[in-house]
Image (cartoon, rainbow, N blue to C red):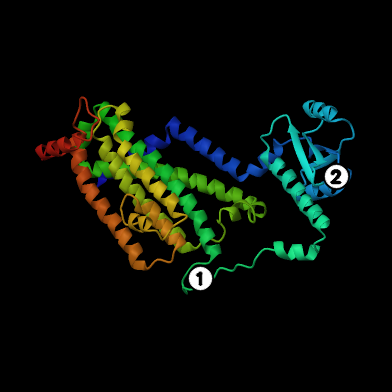
């Protein structure tokens, strides 16, 4: 056991002292700072000219005032200015950036308003949508007035219907709980997807580097394959945990300092306010089990290659499994009760992402959660035993390799080494 801790400590210290770790951590911390201060950054780099000025040529003679009032009430960043010159003069003013855009409003044959929008570029679809919708509202009002229909009757017709959602099951989750669950599931799924790919590849790369440096024979002779493999896995896991704790710590400090701005804004948008403690605990459990499973697979695959540049080719099947799990989880956000999602939540390589989705969005019986966790633990144990044998034989395989056919060759070689 002492050798296990020596290898784990060496792996951990070597990684956190590397320039790659320091640079990556710094960049991730900057990303967290930028994400929390996103609105402030956008305001700082925003347009210093204030409101967007829209020139309006009103050929109807009566549209401008109600149009200006409705648009500016809806969007405070827009300012409508009546242009009294010719259309060509207005276009030139837009090209000279005196105005952001131009709207020419006129009446059609039915005496209803229609408009043409001019701008140097038409990428700002939100402004166009606002201008179009408010002019549409004015058109409806004018049509009502022309037909003589009582305005109160029209308002009653267009009033939104009352449509309440009631779950008949006593333990069914409310819409607010579902929305909140979606937020943490999004975060959890993306987080696991990135971490497993990043650190799984790091484990495989580390094993391949040791093989290429020809020190693996010494390491294997001084410690059992199981001890060496899991020391690598948990050493890199501690590196990831260190990085995660730094990111979470900085994120929590920043969020707490800007809590008044974020609550009701970004945090509410992602449903990350008052997250249930049981959901957080399950998320941690499935994350740790999922990481251990994929890390074991990555270490086993990394032991089959002799050159570091061959790692990416051999871990492709593992990446495909992660991508499939990610896609199933994304599909499950819209259909958590589907058969595909239910079955996938009990498949070990998919369960870490998919089961946490079902836990968050459905009220599952404890036996289903326990069964999924049990299958994951059993799979990790089996993968550990198989992985140790492949690892023992694989790390002693040199020469051209990089195919999954080397899997059986590594097991045969491990038997000879007994």
Viewer-side residue, 8 vs 203: 203
Q: Identify which residue is drawn at 68% across, 34% down.
A: 122
Q: Mark 1 highlights which residue?
A: 167
Mark number for residue 133? none
Mark number for residue 64? 2
Q: Secondary structure beneath disc 2?
A: helix
Left or right: residue 362 versus residue 289 is right
- Say if residue 221 shows up in the picture: no
Whether 361 is drawn above or below 41: the answer is below
Viewer-side residue, 325 vs 161: 161
Q: Residues within 10 Å of mark 2 (few under 14, many from 20)?
A: some
Q: Position of residue 174 (x, y in %)?
A: 53, 67
Q: Identify which residue is drawn at 46% across, 73% down.
A: 169
Whether 261 is drawn above or below 26: the answer is below
Q: Position of residue 100 (x, y in %)?
A: 77, 34
Quadrant placement of the C terminus: top left
Left or right: residue 185 versus residue 9 is right
Q: Position of residue 142 (x, y in %)?
A: 81, 53
Q: Identify which residue is drawn at 19% across, 38% down.
A: 392
Residue lying farthest to the front in this orientation:
109
> Mark 1 against mark 2, which lies toward the viewer?
2
Q: Identify which residue is drawn at 73% across, 44% down.
A: 132
Q: Position of residue 6 (x, y in %)?
A: 29, 41
Whether 400 is drawn above or below 113: the answer is above
Asked whether the beta carbons under mark 1 and mark 2 sit within 8 Å of each other, the answer is: no
Question: How many numbered marks have been drawn onto this rendered protein structure?
Answer: 2
Viewer-side residue, 87 vs 198: 87
Q: Please tell me which of labels 1 and 2 falls first in the chain.
A: 2
Give the distance between the C-alpha atoms of the residues marked 1 and 2, in whole angstroms: 48 Å
Q: Secondary structure beneath disc 1?
A: loop
Q: Residues within 10 Å of mark 1 (few under 14, many from 20)?
A: few
- Say if residue 281 shows up in the picture: yes
């Amino acid at each position: 056991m002492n050798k296990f801790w020596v290898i784990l400590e060496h792996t951990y210290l070597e990684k956190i002292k590397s320039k790659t770790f320091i640079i990556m951590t710094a960049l991730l911390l900057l990303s967290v700072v930028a994400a929390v201060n996103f609105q402030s950054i956008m305001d700082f780099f925003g347009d210093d000219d204030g409101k967007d000025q829209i020139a309006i040529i009103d050929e109807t003679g009566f549209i401008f005032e109600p149009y200006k009032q409705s648009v500016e009430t809806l969007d405070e960043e827009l300012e409508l200015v009546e242009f009294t010159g010719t259309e060509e003069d207005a276009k030139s003013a837009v090209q000279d950036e005196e105005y952001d855009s131009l709207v020419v409003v006129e009446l059609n044959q039915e005496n209803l308003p229609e408009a043409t929008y001019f701008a140097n570029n038409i990428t700002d679809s939100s402004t166009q949508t606002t201008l179009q919708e408010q002019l549409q509202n004015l058109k409806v009002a004018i049509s009502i007035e022309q037909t003589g229909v009582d305005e109160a009757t029209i308002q009653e017709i267009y009033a939104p219907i009352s449509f309440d959602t009631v779950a008949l099951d006593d333990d069914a989750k409310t819409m607010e709980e579902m929305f909140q669950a979606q937020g943490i599931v999004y975060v959890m799924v993306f987080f696991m997807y990135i971490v497993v790919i990043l650190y799984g590849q790091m484990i495989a790369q580390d094993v391949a580097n040791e093989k290429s440096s020809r020190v693996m024979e010494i390491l294997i002779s001084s410690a059992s394959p199981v001890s060496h493999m899991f020391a690598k896995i948990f050493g890199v896991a501690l590196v990831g945990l260190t990085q995660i704790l730094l990111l979470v710590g900085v994120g929590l400090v920043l969020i707490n300092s800007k809590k008044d701005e974020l609550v009701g804004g970004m945090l509410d948008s992602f449903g990350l306010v008052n997250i249930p403690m049981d959901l957080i605990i399950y998320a941690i459990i499935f994350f740790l089990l999922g990481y251990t499973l994929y890390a074991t697979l990555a270490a086993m695959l990394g032991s089959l290659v002799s050159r570091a540049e061959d790692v990416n080719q051999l871990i492709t099947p593992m990446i495909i499994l992660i991508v499939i799990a990610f896609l199933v989880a994304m599909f499950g956000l819209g259909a958590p009760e589907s058969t595909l999602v239910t079955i996938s939540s009990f498949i070990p390589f998919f369960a870490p992402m998919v089961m946490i989705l079902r836990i968050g969005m459905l009220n599952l019986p404890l036996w289903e959660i326990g069964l999924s966790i049990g299958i994951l633990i059993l799979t990790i144990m089996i993968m550990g035993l198989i992985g140790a044998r492949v690892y023992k034989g694989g790390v002693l395989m040199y020469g051209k390799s990089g195919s999954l056919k080397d899997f059986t060759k590594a097991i045969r070689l491990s038997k000879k080494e007994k």
